[in-house]
Image (cartoon, rainbow, N blue to C red):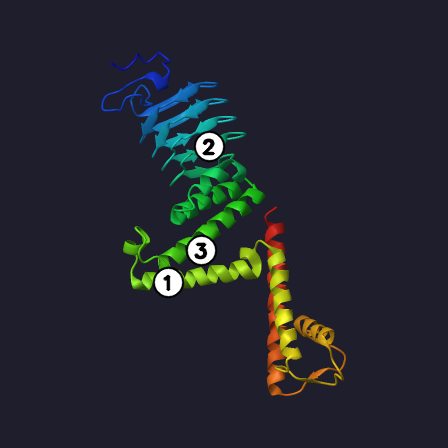
């Protein structure tokens, strides 16, 4: 079909061009679609690749079984748009409005978002689809996190951050241990696996101790575990104290909590050098826990 005259305004989803697959989405130049209004349209079985979609209105449109891959989508209006089984692999979205849009069985592999109004709840199902590809999930979650930070969506940013870090931990674990995996088994050398194992360990420790800096409750939990461990050390005589006649479990719990907080517990003193050393270690752990707790609260407050 010959290209339309310059003053015509054809529906870009119905034009065919040279060297393009049937039902392809193309514009008058077979390279871009610009300044089109497709509000309330029901669009099915369309495909576009390596193209530019710009200044297009898709308000309340329904896209089903479509492929918009490795393309640039700029200044498009997707408010209340329904995406069903749509592949958006490798596409880059800039200044797009996704308010109240929904995604069902969609692929966002390698997609990127810049200054787009999109929330964690909207794309959660798309993120869950990538659990078997943690490296892809990590990169997508990072792009969405940076996008949310740019727009001041701090709650969504934290959720994307947690998804990114969990995916990073899974990626590092597979990198270190999946010797027979179809992807990880062939891609990485021994030194890469050792590095991946170390990164995985560090990420797990961060998760357990303070939830990657996002969960103050994890700090309280870790502090409680430390206090109980040292209480048991007091109880079983590993750490011996003096000036404590007939102590019981609760007395040892009080000594451990006071030592952790760096406060004295009456006139109780360590009985020997090893006890003094271990009590000093618990005090330093208490100081570190207090610092982590302050840091988690500061991170949450400073992002508001």
Q: Earlier in the sequence, mark 3 or mark 1?
A: 3
Residue bearing the label numbered 2 = 104
Q: Is residue 79 left or right of residue 197?
A: right
x, y percent for residue 178: 35, 57
Residue bearing the label numbered 1 = 195
Q: How packed is label 1: few (under 14 Cα within 10 Å), some, or many (20 or more)?
A: some
x, y percent for residue 129: 43, 41
Query: Label 3 vs label 1: CA separation?
Result: 12 Å
Q: Quadrant of the N terminus?
A: top left
Above or below, 274 against 214 in this view is below
Q: Nearer the viewer, mark 2 or mark 3?
A: 2
Residue bearing the label numbered 3 = 169
Residue 211 image-quadrant placement: bottom right
- Which residue is at 62% across, 56% downward? 216
* Element class at badge 2: strand
Q: Nearer the viewer, mark 3 or mark 1?
A: 3
């Amino acid at each position: 079909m010959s290209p339309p005259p310059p003053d015509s305004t054809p529906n870009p989803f119905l034009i065919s061009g040279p060297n393009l697959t049937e039902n392809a989405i193309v514009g008058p130049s077979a390279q871009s679609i610009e300044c089109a209004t497709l509000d309330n349209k029901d669009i099915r079985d369309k495909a576009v690749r390596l193209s530019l979609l710009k200044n297009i209105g898709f308000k309340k449109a329904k896209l089903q079984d479509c492929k918009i891959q490795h393309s640039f989508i700029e200044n498009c209006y997707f408010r209340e748009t329904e995406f069903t089984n749509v592949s958006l692999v490798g596409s880059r979205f800039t200044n797009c409005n996704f308010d109240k849009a929904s995604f069902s069985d969609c692929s966002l592999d390698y997609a990127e978002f810049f200054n787009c109004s999109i929330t964690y709840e909207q794309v959660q199902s798309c993120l869950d689809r990538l659990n078997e590809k943690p490296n892809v999930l990590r990169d997508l979650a990072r792009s969405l996190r940076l996008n949310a930070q740019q727009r001041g969506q701090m709650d969504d940013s934290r959720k994307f951050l947690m998804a990114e870090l969990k995916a990073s931990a899974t990626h590092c674990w597979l990198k270190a241990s999946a010797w027979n995996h179809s992807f990880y088994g062939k891609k990485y050398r021994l030194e890469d696996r050792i590095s991946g194992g170390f990164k995985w360990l560090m990420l797990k420790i961060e998760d357990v101790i303070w939830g990657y800096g996002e969960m103050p409750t994890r700090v309280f939990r870790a502090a409680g575990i430390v206090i109980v461990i040292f209480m048991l050390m007091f109880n079983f005589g590993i750490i011996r104290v003096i000036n404590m006649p007939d102590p019981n479990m609760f007395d040892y719990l009080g000594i451990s909590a006071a030592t952790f907080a760096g406060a004295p517990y009456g006139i109780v003193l360590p009985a020997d050098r090893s006890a003094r050393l271990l009590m000093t270690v618990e005090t330093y752990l208490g100081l570190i826990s207090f610092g982590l707790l302050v840091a988690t609260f500061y991170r949450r407050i400073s992002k508001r």
